Amino acid sequence: MKLAPTVLFIFLFAANAVAQSVANKAFVCGECNSANIREIQKADTKELYCFLAGFKKCYNNADYMEHANPMLFALLQHDSRLMIELLTKYPELNDKNIYDELQHPVQDCDIKRLMFIVDRSNDNSPVKQGILNALSKIKNE
């Protein structure tokens, strides 16, 4: 009967590992899964971090980028201050792919209004200037 505690321990350990695995599947940072970016306006800081990190890791994934591009513009319109703050605070997120995507919107958007929204932020960082620069290239095309 010495085997019973060992079996119980292994069962509990395995059950806990499965539960953690299922819990972690709800949102895994860095996965190129477009389902993670459906409602950017309701995302918390970690989800936004992971969304922005996807532009580096998932740039060659066409399905991901097809969904990420409009969401990038939605984030910029919804809370440009937060986007600038995240890109400034976490330099690993500040990737050229974000600026490339900003130069090529897949949906029609009011670039002039978007530039006004970004420009209104009280930040004068290189990130803000980079975003405005990328958007201005659309305006001038």
Image: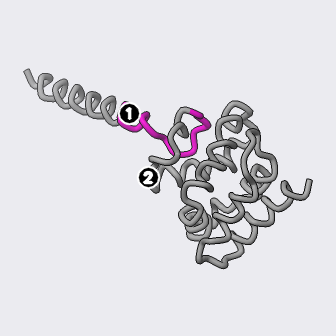
From the image, tell me which residue sits under label 1. Answer: 21
Q: From the viewer's perspective, is the residue at label 1 or at label 2 nearer?
A: 2
Q: Residue furthest left?
A: 1
Local crowd size for mark 2, using a 10 Å CA cut-off: few (<14), some (14–19), many (≥20): few
Q: On screen, 16 above or below 133?
A: above
Q: Which residues are magenta?
A: 21-34
CA–CA distance between discs 1 and 2? 21 Å
Q: Position of residue 111 (x, y in %)?
A: 75, 55
Rendered image coloring scheme = one colour
Q: Residue at x 81, y 47 (%)?
A: 104
Judge left or right: residue 7 versus residue 103.
Answer: left
Residue nearer the viewer, 122 or 89: 122
Upstream in the sequence, badge 1 or badge 2?
Answer: 1
Local crowd size for mark 1, using a 10 Å CA cut-off: few (<14), some (14–19), many (≥20): few
Residue nearer the viewer, 124 or 77: 77
Q: Residue at x 65, y 36 (%)?
A: 67
Q: Amino acid at mark 1?
A: Ser
Figure quadrant of residue 5: top left
Q: Is label 2 in a helix, a strand or a loop?
A: loop
Residue 25 among magenta residues: yes
Judge left or right: residue 12 versus residue 137.
Answer: left
From the image, tell me which residue sits under label 2. Answer: 44
Judge left or right: residue 91 versus residue 62.
Answer: left
Q: Amino acid at mark 2?
A: Asp
